Amino acid sequence: MQMLCLAGVLLGLSPATWAAVPGPQVVAPSDDTAVQVKNASPLEKMHSQVRNWVAKTNGGSADEVQIAPMDSRVQVLPCERPLWIDHPFASKETVRVRCPLVAGTVGQNANAVPVWQLYLRIVSAQPVVAPAAARSGALVSANPVKMVVAKQLLQRGTVLTADMLQEVDAQLLPNGQVDTTQLTSVKDVSMAELVRDVPAGSPLRTHDIRRAVLVKMGQQVLMTVGNGNDFQIRVRVEALQDGRMGDQVKLKNAESGKSLSGLVIGPNAVKGL
């Protein structure tokens, strides 16, 4: 009860607005540490950091993490600071890599514009296509690689939902490989919006979507404080800026006038920092 009262005081709440309710714990991603590889190329350094981050985040060994080949036309530029790495979508197959313009962690610079960013796909250790199958255009995996296509014309700015899309077998490129920029699971588009029009039947690629704005400036959002085990407080606050999933946003308690900060965890929902 003492912890509940203390949290209420910090938020500037009156006792009447306190509501201890059970709920799941939301854990923010841990910060990534740069992996320095002597005499390595920018691509090798990026892959090294990504493998270590995936192993640390999802468990397992970095040596077991396999990264799908990138388009040969994409050039990885050097980055002076440790890369920011995260899972931008629900599916753990996609990893976003950003080169920060400013010092500090992504949590300290939630709205900072990166120098560059790339999306990588994490794959299993087994190859997707065997040489003979590549010539015939057939997938040989027991679980064929999928791609996500639009069921209908989807316009720019549309916040995507599962019923707008379907998963079909991925088609191969002329070289017999799978286009690694294509999204492979409908889960990848959870809480995402389109940045361009996509015709019906067209595949969605990583550069076609971005995280949707889930918290809008001026709107009331539900703020949760607590770990869900000992106590949890929920209160309505006003958003002072727009925010996407994982962004840190400024908030205001209308009752007390106190300024707060929170992490966007869902539509009109934030977690207190």
Image (tube, helix red, strand yellow):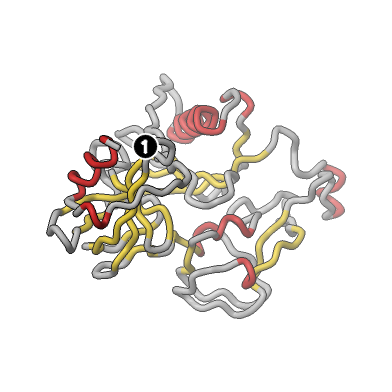
Residue in view at x 87 percent, y 44 percent: 132
Image spot of residue 40 (x, y percent): 45, 25
Image spot of residue 210 (x, y percent): 45, 61
In depth, the one of 213 and 230 nearer the eye is 230
In depth, the one of 258 and 86 nearer the eye is 258
Q: How many marks?
A: 1
Q: Residues within 10 Å of mark 1 (few under 14, many from 20)?
A: few
In depth, the one of 138 and 75 nearer the eye is 138
Residue in view at x 84 percent, y 46 percent: 140
Element at label 1: loop
Residue 115 appears in the picture as rendered: no
Residue in view at x 62 percent, y 72 percent: 164
Left or right: 198 with respect to 264? right
Extreme residue toward the left, this view:
257
The three-letter code of the residue at mark 1 reads Pro
Image spot of residue 208 (x, y percent): 51, 64
Q: Which quarter of the figure is the N terminus placed in?
A: top left
Q: Which quarter of the figure is the C terminus placed in?
A: top left
Left or right: 84 with respect to 66? left
Residue 156 appears in the picture as rendered: yes
Image spot of residue 37 (x, y percent): 43, 22
| Picture layout, residue 231 above or below residue 39 | below
Residue in view at x 63 percent, y 34 percent: 66
Left or right: 167 with respect to 189? right
Residue hosting label 1: 78
